[in-house]
Each structure stands twice: as C-alpha cells, then as structure tokens.
Amino acid sequence: MLVAERAGVSIASVSRVLNGLPASTSVTERVQQAAAELGYVPDATARSLKVGKTEQIALAVADVGNPVYVAMMHEVSRVVADAGYRLVVSSTGSDPDDQITLLTSLNRGFADGLILSPLRVTEALIDHLRASRLPIVVIGSLPAGVDLDSVRADSAAGMGLAIKHLAKQGRQRIAFINGPVDTVPGAARLSGYTLAMAKRGIAMHGDLQVNADDFTFKAGLVATEALLDQATPDAIVCANDLLAVAALKVLTRRGFSVPNDVALVGMDDTDIAELTTPSITSVNLGSVKRARTAAKLLIRRLNEPDAPVKQVVIEPKLTIRESSMIGAAATPATDSRSVVSHSSGGDDA
Amino acid sequence: MLVAERAGVSIASVSRVLNGLPASTSVTERVQQAAAELGYVPDATARSLKVGKTEQIALAVADVGNPVYVAMMHEVSRVVADAGYRLVVSSTGSDPDDQITLLTSLNRGFADGLILSPLRVTEALIDHLRASRLPIVVIGSLPAGVDLDSVRADSAAGMGLAIKHLAKQGRQRIAFINGPVDTVPGAARLSGYTLAMAKRGIAMHGDLQVNADDFTFKAGLVATEALLDQATPDAIVCANDLLAVAALKVLTRRGFSVPNDVALVGMDDTDIAELTTPSITSVNLGSVKRARTAAKLLIRRLNEPDAPVKQVVIEPKLTIRESSMIGAAATPATDSRSVVSHSSGGDDA
DNA sequence: CTGTTAGCGCCTTCAG
DNA sequence: CTGAAGGCGCTAACAG
C-alpha cells in the first residue's frame, strides 16, 4: 500500500494508527502525515467484509409522504448517527410483500439491523421477521406471542383521551374519520373509538363513521365530504393529522365554524397540526419518542445480541389547540397550547 | 461453501447461476434449489469489495423538516431504487463543514455517488467537491466556473412570475419575507425580487422586506409579526411555503383577509400549500423534477464516467391558488387551481 | 512495539 | 460448460 511505503512502515501499522491502536510516536506521526498527503482514507467496504459489520442501519416505513414518518425518520437518523451508524432508508409501500423482499435482501448483509414500521402485518411477514438472522425492531403492534423487540403507541388510550376531552364539552355526535381498517393503526384506532364511546355511554351511529381510502390528505377530503353528506356531527376525531387537516378544509368550505359548530381532533401531533387556522388539537402518540426508543433498542441489541426481548408501549398525551377549545375562534391566543397526560387515569368516570 | 456442496457443484458455478450467467439446466436447477433450501443469498459486502461498487447512493440535504426536501428525497429514492441502488440519507445541517466531513467519509467508499443540496456554498466546500473521486451531482446554484453536474431552479424567474401575477392585480406594496440572505436560495430569491420589482417599476421600501432567521414556520411567524409591525403591505411573497404558511397564520390572526386585503404567494409549491384555508399560491420551482433529474444525472455518470458535464436549469411555473385570487375567499371553488408557465415570456410588458 | 500472514465471501480470469 | 485459484483492501492473530 502506498501509505505504508511512503511512511516506511508496514501495512499493518498503518491500520493500527488509523484505528487508534497503540503505536510509537514516530510511527504514528509518519503514518498520519503520509495519509494526509495522499488523502488516504481506509475503505469502508473492505473493513466491513473483514469485521462483519457495515455500520449501517436500515429503516423501512410505509408512507414517506406522511409527516409522522418524516419525523420518525429524522429522529432515527439522529440517534443512529450518534452511535456511528449510517441510515439507509427503504421506502416500501404498504404492501407486506415489499417488506418481505426487503427482509431477504437484508440478509445479504448490507445493513447490520432494521427498524420496520409496517402498516399491515401478515403471517408471512411475521415468519420472515422471525427467520431473519439480523436484529429487527418493529415500530407498531405485533400479534401476541411474537417476541421481537418492539415499540408501539397505545392508540386506544389515545382515542380515549380525545373522546373524553370532547365529551367533557358536551359533544354528543362525535364522528370518526378513520383510514383503511385493514391496517394495524386503522384497526387499533377503530377499536379505541368504539371502546371509548361505549365507556362514556355516547351513542354511536354508522353514519358517524367513515373510512378514508388511505391516510392521506386527498383521501381525507373525500371521506369528509361523505361524512358531512350523511350526518351532522358536533365533533370529529380523525385517525391522523392529514385526515384532520382535510376535514378542517372541508368544514371551513362548507361554512362550519371550528370549534364552535364542530370540534376537531387529529392524531400523531405532527407539525402540520399547528400550521393551520385554527390549529388542530391532536393526540400525541409519541412518534418521536417511539422512533428514538426503537433506534436505541436496535443499537442495544447490536451491542448485546442476547439481551432479553423488550416491548415498549408509549403513553399518549393530548395536545389541545384551537380546533377544540370553545370560544377559541373568537379570541385565538398567540401560543395557546396545553397538554393533558393519560397517565393519571383516575378522573375517568 | 454449503450451497456448492449441497448442489454437488463448484463454488464458481453457484456464483454463475446466481448472477444469471450461462450454465447447464441441471446445474442451474440444483443450485437454485439448494440456495432456496438454505435460504442463501450472496453477501453484499463481499460482492461490493470484489466488484468495486456498493450499489448505494448518498443523499445529503440540509433540513429534513422542510417538505420540499422530503419531496426531493422521495423522488430520488424512487429513481435510484429503480436503477438498483439503495439510498443512504445523510442529514447534514446547514453547516458546510458537516458536508465536508461527509465528503471525506464518502471517499471511504460506502456509496458509489452523492447527491448534494447545500444551503451555503463556501470555497472550501467547492474544493472538496472537486477533489472527490466519486461522482457528485449538486442540486442548487454553483459559482461560475465549477464544472460539476448540477440541477438548479431559476428562482429569479420564479420571483418574476410571482411579482408579475401580483402586479397585474394592481398590488403596489408587495412585501418580501426571505430566509437568511447568506444562503444560496436566500441570496437568489432576494436578487430575483429586487430585479422583478425594478423591472415593473414598483417602488421598494426597506420596511417591506424582512429576513426570517431560517426557512422554518417558527421563524416565519416572528418575521411576519415584524413585517406587519412596520408596514402595511397589500401583498406578500415568501421565500418558501413554510414561511408563507406562517404569514397566513399571522395575517389571519391579525384580522387581515387573504387575499382581499393581502395577497400571499409562497415558493416551492409543496403539499402544505394546498392544505391551508385559503390554499396558497406558490411558485413551483420544480423540486420533484430537480430531484429526478439529479438522480438520473448521477446514474448516467456512474454508467459513463466520461460523459460531458451537464448543468440543467429547471423553469419555474406559478401555481395559482386561493390566496392570491381576488374574490376567492367569498366563493372558494373545490378544485381551483391554474398554472402559469414561465417559458412563454412574451407578454411581459 | 512492529512486521508477516491468513483469510473475510465473492467474482473472474484461466485451464480443462 | 465447469472447476481451480487468485485477489479486492482490510484487520486480527501470531511471531519477532
């Protein structure tokens, strides 16, 4: 190797110096100078082959267009970078088969581990997750009995917070705009809604529930139109913030005052919830915290492969904004924002 | 190797079959079966070392929180995936030093090429870009004389479209909310504004110009407050959509009607421009197209390293929405959206 | 403390 | 068409 020659030392010494292993001062100096002069940096690929680590972590999320995934990606990126890893993003669609393809290609060893947030979970996907020889952390709910590291939100509890908040205002016709019910979050949020409404003894009507085709703004517009054509709610809970923004748009267009005529609550508590006028109350499902936790779990497992499996549940909070504050439209405060936590569940009568 | 034994063939034949090179039917069959049974997939790292390609492309953007970069990332991801590459995202800050660090680590060969969209360009950065032995495509303006593949928007022309649109409505006090002027886009948009205003003979006042601390919603709120404290514009152009959304929020809060009292135009034409009420007119700087073009340029160079340097300029368009349509607030149409192209520059008197 | 050596797993000439 | 062998650039043992 050129650097070795130039410094007049062996090739191994170069490796040692560049990896910070003990070496004499003179050798260290000469090697560093030679390396600097030649602009030499050790080859990552060869190193990976030898050491058996790529220093890369893969992240697979379903919908890059959804701000909640962007926030998650951002956080994961930060944490893995701090731990010396690069982030490889694999934008799979919502199709489990895409993720299976990714999993097999993962076994080619281009990354040391994977963080996966699947929208739909099939048997086949679970099988492949189990079969993978690389560490995997799942963001989202897993069927009982699957012992993989995972982090999930308690969206049922989150729906509970939203319904409670609205019920306290005396809202009686609380509608629900969900995404596709055959997705993990869609199913969870539906059951959370049903549960919370029943618990508070609020009547449920089929007319008050619609499902958007997916968790996007566009689908939200269509769903909201459908809802308002068939019912007149005094409150709407949406399965995520994009749907809520869409609902706000349609409500405004139809001349409803938010929150006076209709209160509105979203989910995920992403940035866009505070961009709108009125700003939108949203259930914070701890997306950033989930992302951070998942990344840390994965790094932990990379360091200690035999650590016990950990399944973390993040508690939701409610971030109250103008869209559900009575009278807020009249006198919108500059920084009106208050938080209600779920953990103190005592006042739940 | 296990697969070779199991199939009763040589290790080389396995390689051949798995790479689709000619082999007899029987060998092919046996190898494929053995590989399937063992769940064998060739190791990417070893392959990379041998072949000298990682099949990875790195993307470095300044601000992952900005929807325009998300859109770009999305598009780049799609294009490189189609070409068989993985995407490594390196979220550098706006600091050029971060990017230099990235560039040197790029030379370690963890990726085959880089797409870089720098917010600030220093001499040092340029030097490192030139010195890199790996192909690089820059999204954004480059100083004259730097012959690297690049794709940039014509934001000066874009500002021209915005000003022209507003001037036609008789707006005379057209304010400008910019981001930091020491950034590439900040500088470009400022000169575009100055030029366009001068060209149309519209008076400019220092009071009508403010610079946000960065290109974020939060900074936009502060900047808009400052602007409205010192002036009463009848139109506002913002250097990007996040700033425009912030401006809309403050305008609404202060009781201004948009677009009747104040017309509003953003830049980048990202998704959020149509989420708001009223939706926001925005200069489309072709972010998606820029991203796609950049990715294709990089892939072209990977295939033909000696191809001539290409510097592409994407022409802007104006996407007109409610925030600048007179009377729109009264009767907002469901899908009111029209596009004005820049290319036909004849009616510019 | 330093130099020599043996692979990491794969692809790719080169013979056969 | 197939098998054998070398080496991509690096690191980790082992001598010296």
Image: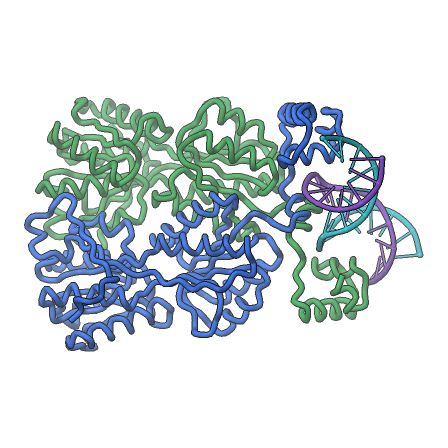
Chain colours: A green, B blue, C purple, D cyan
Side of B81 where A63 appears, left or right:
left
Tell me which residue sits at (58%, 42%) in the image.
A111
What number of labels is visible? 0
Q: Quadrant of residue A285?
A: top left
Depth check: give the residue in front, A16 or B349: B349
Horizontal and vertical percent for residue A21?
Answer: 74, 58
Residue at 14%, 40% in the rendered image:
A251
Q: Is residue B280 above or below residue A97?
A: below
Left or right of residue B330: residue B335 = right
- Front in this rendered view, residue A262 or B68: B68
Report the residue at 25% width, 29% height from top. A211
Residue B296 horizontal/vertical position (percent): 45, 53
Front residue of A20/B109: it is: B109
Residue depicted at 46% across the width and 39% down the height: A60
**Residue B35, above or below B274:** above
Query: Does residue B242 appear anywhere in the picture?
Result: no
The C terminus of chain B sits in image quarter: bottom left
Residue A257 seen anywhere in this rendered image of the structure: yes
Viewed as shown, does residue B96 lie left or right of B178? Answer: right
* Quadrant of residue A53 within the rendered picture: top right
